[in-house]
Image: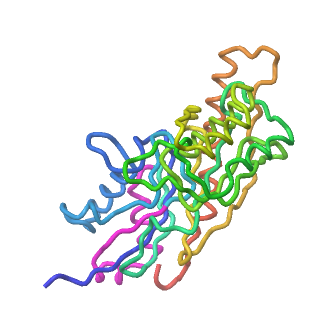
């Protein structure tokens, strides 16, 4: 007789540069692969049940994640013998430091991590060489990407995927009173959609495309346009929000992003060093965020 099973929703964060994306792939290190490795090491999964561990949002190699989520099915007896605190500790202690296992809770058998209320991404545009904040018109550019529309020209469209996407907001990302990029919130996103949006905004800033070209690409999806894809390392999946899972609002913990070199002619070496330091700033920010949003319930008699 098969033992009773329980479906568990969990949340995680990770530093993208260490992984070839989130989804498991043969012969390369991925976030899902690391999670399955740890669950098997703990003998919580048998050799044939890796498919029971599924992530919510797919991310490409190099993309950072503040909070993503997933689901796994385990034996009821195991879950009953653990607290959330014990399970999070057991998994987190065995994962690389570049992955944070943040929380876990029991959900209904039909709970699907891919069906979320919304997803939040942030992109640090100033990481792209030559970006200059354009002032007030930046808000006009961001508004071009809000609404429900066919995003074919702003995505790498997979066969069978519905290209109609609903974007709730697209606003400046402000750090220390400086606009460093943008935040975009949508119901769900197509592959590369945020990075292609970032590239269109970057191209608007340097004058290589116009607002009308962006509007036409959005309103005429049957006419192919390719504005390019922005680098992954400046992108953060900031949050995935589910209606039945406690949502940790953005803490906006105190952190500092160093401004890009402001010299009229910035040496290539200066820019490269700034980029290296800025990537570390983003990673430091994520570790501090995890220390706050990963707070667990404490029961001194059962922890």
* 21 and 226: which is toward the camera: 226
Residue 137 position (above or below residue 67): above
Viewport quadrant of the N terminus: bottom left
Q: Position of residue 243 (x, y in %)?
A: 56, 75
**Image quarter for residue 78?**
bottom left
The residue sitting at 42% across, 59% down in the picture is 93
Q: Position of residue 190 (x, y in %)?
A: 50, 50
**Image quarter for residue 235?**
top right
Magenta span contains residue 89: yes
* 79 and 186: which is toward the camera: 186
* 163 and 92: which is toward the camera: 163
The residue sitting at 39% across, 74% down in the picture is 8
* 170 and 59: which is toward the camera: 170
Residue 19 position (above or below residue 164): above
Q: Position of residue 91 (x, y in %)?
A: 40, 63
| Colour option used | rainbow
Q: How many marks?
A: 0
Magenta span contains residue 77: yes
Q: Position of residue 140 (x, y in %)?
A: 79, 45
Q: Which residues are magenta?
A: 69-96
Could you tell me what secondary structure mostly forms the magenta stretch? Answer: helix
Q: Is residue 131 left or right of residue 11?
A: right
The residue sitting at 51% across, 59% down in the picture is 68
Residue 102 position (above or below residue 149): below
Q: Is residue 239 left or right of residue 8?
A: right
């Amino acid at each position: 007789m098969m033992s009773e099973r329980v479906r568990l929703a969990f949340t995680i964060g990770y530093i993208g540069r260490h992984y070839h994306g989130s989804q498991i792939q043969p012969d390369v290190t991925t976030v899902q692969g690391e999670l399955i490795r740890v669950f098997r090491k703990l003998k919580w999964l048998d050799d044939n049940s890796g498919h029971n561990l599924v992530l919510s949002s797919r991310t490409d190699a190099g993309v950072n994640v503040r909070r993503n989520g997933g689901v796994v099915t385990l034996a009821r007896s195991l879950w009953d013998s653990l607290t959330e605190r014990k399970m999070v500790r057991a998994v987190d202690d065995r994962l690389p430091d570049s992955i944070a296992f943040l929380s876990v809770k029991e959900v209904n058998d039909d709970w699907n991590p891919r069906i979320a209320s919304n997803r939040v991404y942030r992109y640090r545009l100033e990481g792209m060489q030559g970006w200059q904040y354009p002032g007030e018109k930046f808000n006009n550019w961001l508004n071009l990407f809000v609404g429900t529309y066919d995003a074919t020209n702003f995505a790498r469209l997979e066969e069978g995927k519905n290209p109609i996407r609903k974007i709730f907001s697209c606003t400046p990302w402000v750090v220390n009173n400086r606009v460093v990029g943008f935040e975009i919130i949508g119901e769900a996103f197509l592959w590369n959609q945020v990075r292609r949006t970032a590239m269109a905004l970057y191209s608007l800033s340097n004058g290589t495309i116009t607002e009308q070209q962006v509007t036409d690409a959005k309103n005429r999806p049957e006419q192919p346009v390719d504005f390019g894809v922005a680098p992954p390392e400046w992108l953060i999946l900031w949050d995935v929000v589910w209606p039945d899972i406690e949502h940790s609002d953005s803490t906006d913990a105190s952190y500092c992003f160093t401004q890009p070199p402001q010299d009229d002619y910035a040496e290539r070496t200066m820019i490269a060093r700034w980029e290296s330091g800025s990537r570390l700033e983003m990673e430091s920010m994520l570790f501090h965020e995890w220390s706050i949003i990963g707070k667990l319930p404490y029961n001194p008699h059962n922890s």
